[in-house]
Image (cartoon, rainbow, N blue to C red):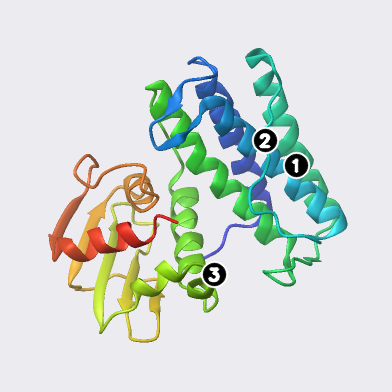
Amino acid sequence: MDVLDITRIAEGLREHTAGLADAASRRAPDTVVPTCPEWTLRDLVGHVGQAHRWAAAMFRRGGTRVTDELPRDTPADQADWGAWLREGAAEAIAAQAEHPGAVAHPVMGDAPSAMWLRRMLHDTSVHHADATITAGTPFAIAPDLAADELTETFGLLTAPAAAHLKPELGELRGSGETLCLRADEPSVPGWLITRTPDAAVVEYETRDADMTIAGPVRDLMLVFARRLSPDDAAVKITGDRALLDHWLEHTAV
């Protein structure tokens, strides 16, 4: 599956930052985010805005330390949140453009700065969904961005080091069970996950599987991000539903 180019990544980051800002302005700052129940809207906005600024600093100086949890400080006045969020996204985009090469990180090693900006995009798009769920407003995402969010997520969950960092991901191993994600959009090839004894392996294709979930790629993204229950999504599940439930239970990390 094709990876987004840096222009599209930056465009998507701006779009979903603005969408998050709009949704977050529609409820009181202390409103609890139901999909992140330990957070309020202020926490959600603070996390995203600080993540963008953290990324910008890493592009400029390298990731010289591991941050377990970013601060979630926001402007005191909710009316200032939108401009603050957009400024952080713009700063990250500009810093990546200034430093397009590899960035050093103490855990992830050297990786292209574009990879980290892509991470900011997808973190922001999922949290945009959180904000819309909290506000009771619709969430929209372009099919190419939703598909790339799924591709990136599966890549992170099945990376060789993933189970060492998050031991619960070791439960994604299996004995050949297969899960297929089939998107309605013809432009999205889909995904086939095979749970082998060594690791979960992802291929970018669709074929008969032990469990198939099919529907709009937006809904597939929200289900696998655990922002939307499969029972509430516009999806059809065939085969062994327990395989899907097991995957979702063990990727809540």
> What is the CA distance from the residue labelled 1 to the residue labelled 3?
24 Å
Name the outermost residue toward the left: 239
- Residue at (28% x, 60% y) in the render: 182
Tell me, yes or no, if residue 1 can be seen here. Answer: no
Identity of the residue drawn at 68% across and 50% down? 7
Pinpoint residue 59: horizontal percent, then vertical percent. Answer: 81, 55
Give the amino acid type for the residue marked by disc 2 in the picture.
Gly
Of the numbered discs in the image, which one, if any, rests on residue 195? none
**1 and 2 marks in contact (CB < 8 Å):** yes
Instruction: Please give the name of the residue rendered at 40% of the width and 50% of the height, measured from the top-left corner.
Output: 225
Marks 1 and 2, how far apart at CA: 7 Å
Q: Is residue 76 above or below residue 180?
A: above
* Badge 3 element: helix
Residue 174 at x, y percent in the picture:
29, 80
Tell me the mark number nearer the camera, choosing from 3 and 2: 3
Q: How many marks?
A: 3
- Give residue 129's quadrant in the image: top left
Question: Of residues 165 and 112, which is closer to you in this image?
Answer: 165
Residue that mark 1 sits on = 53
Give me the disc on residue 165. Answer: 3
Q: Is residue 23 visible?
A: yes
The amino acid type of the residue labelled 1 equals: Arg
The residue labelled by disc 2 is 49
Closer to the camera: disc 1 or disc 3? Answer: 3
N-terminal label among 1 and 3: 1
| Among numbered discs 3 and 2, the one appearing first in the sequence | 2
Q: Give, as a three-letter code, the residue at label 3.
A: Leu
- Cα separation, mark 3 vs mark 2, equals 25 Å
